[in-house]
Amino acid sequence: MALSHLRKLLNNPGPFADAYDPEEATKAIQTTKILVVGAGGLGCEILVNLACLGFESIDVVDMDTIDLTNLNRQFLFRKKDVGQPKAQIAAEAIQRRMPNCRVTPIVSKVQDIPMDQLYTYGLVICGLDSVEARRWVNATLVSMVDDDDPQSLKALIDGGCEGFRGQARVILPTITSCYECSLDMLPSKKTYPICTIANKPRLLEHCVEWAYVLQWQAEQGEKDPSSEQIPFNPELPEHMDWLVRTASERAKEFNIPGVITHSSAQGIVKNIIPSVASTNAIIAAACCTEAFKLVTGCNPILDNYMMYTGDQGVYTYSFSLEKQKDCPVCGIEAVLLPVCGNEPLSAVVNRLKEKYRLSNPSLSLTPNSSSTPTRPLYYAAPPSLEASTRSNLSISMRELCQQCRSLTVTDTQLPVSMKVVLRWE
Ligand SMILES: [Zn+2]
């Protein structure tokens, strides 16, 4: 935005803006450093909006490269850019059009950004399709908060899209509810970007989606181009046989371990949500409007969750999502876990996995007094520790824990450890 336009806007603060100085607000827009996480469908929109709003210092992090299938909605990319890093091409595209805005690409996982660098940002905006990366950013920003250092509190604006639906939310770490607080609101079915399915499968699910979404059609076309194509029907055993066989072959080709069964494949194919460019645009606009208000203080910010639904007419609804007292990331109360004395450790591990969406948790006993050391119960990694603690999985909780009342749980999904208090049933 031209400076004169920016001034016009900022010289007319809303009725709820207090202790407001338009000069300072203008300076804040020009100097606040923003980290944009993700340079895909949402990320491209966010970058353009931020640059057009007058922000001048943006870092964008994305580890992915551009795929042909991205081009319909990730409009900063052209055909010649296919195969190039998204962050780099997106940064160059913005820079070309808006020379005032410095966009620095970071081609890596967000998890690899060092803490002291994270500290330099005034604000973080996530435009991701990965729950894992979001959980990491959220938990990291919550753990960074130091009560004696106001600079350590970094607001997080999180945008998310699923087909015709989306949400934007403002998270003030430790003050408002966090991403983890609402993890159980997530639909249990995961979705995958089509480019991952087509080119970089890492999970069995990716292979099933590939067979179902792309390969079925391709093989139908090969058989007899003149005859009408038969749509894939997950209820037909012969179709499912083909699916399991084709997906398993692909998994083998990409060295993905595990077994695909009829029922697991069926669960995957029944729910695929495409990415819709206009939903991205709406959610990105909401996120960037919040960024503008947060940085300038010209109007009150969203408190704290906006959901947009475009598949049943058009509907938006904002509400204040409350903090969960026992949230493993921002909660003030310990996580309570009911356990039976005679159940094996493996049952507890599985329950933790399911309830807190952990991938491979490690558990140790927290001693009742500080003089006794922490005792490992089960370590998921490295392999040597896994092997030496594996036998505990079949031992009963009563026998393993004896007098101890709490556990420390760590997992790759969470950068912080989780304190779990056992409630004996
Ligand atoms: Zn929380």
Image: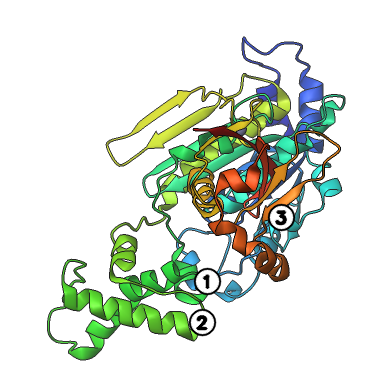
Residue 111, label in figure: 3
- Regarding residue 258, the answer to whether it shows in the image is yes
What count of labels does the image hold? 3
Q: Mark 1 points at which residue?
A: 202
Between marks 3 and 1, how big is the CA–CA gap? 18 Å
Q: Where is residue 44 in the image (x, y as percent from the top left)?
A: 58, 53
Name the side, left or right, on which 311 lies relative to 136: left
Look at the numbered discs 2 and 1 and tell me whether their residues touch, using CB distance below 8 Å. yes
| Secondary element at image label 2 | loop
Whole-angstrom CA distance, mark 2 to mark 1, is 8 Å
Q: Which amino acid does label 1 sit on?
A: Arg
Judge left or right: residue 218 versus residue 63. Answer: left
| Amino acid type, residue under disc 2 in the picture | Phe
Circle 2 residue: 254
Instruction: Please name the residue shown 57% across and 74% down the image.
Output: 82
* Label 3 crowd (10 A; few <14 / some 14-19 / many >=20): few
**Which residue is more in the foreground, 336 or 245?**
336
N-terminal-most mark, 3 or 2 = 3
The answer to whether any part of residue 1 appears in the image is no
* Amino acid type, mark 3: Gln
Q: Is mark 1 on a helix, strand or loop?
A: loop
Q: Is mark 2 within 8 Å of ligand 1?
A: no
Counting from the top left corner in percent of width and height, residue 413 is at: 62, 52
The local crowd at label 2, few if under 14, some if 14 to 19, many if 20 or more residues have their Cα within 10 Å, is: some
Given residues 386 and 242, the one toward you in this image is 386
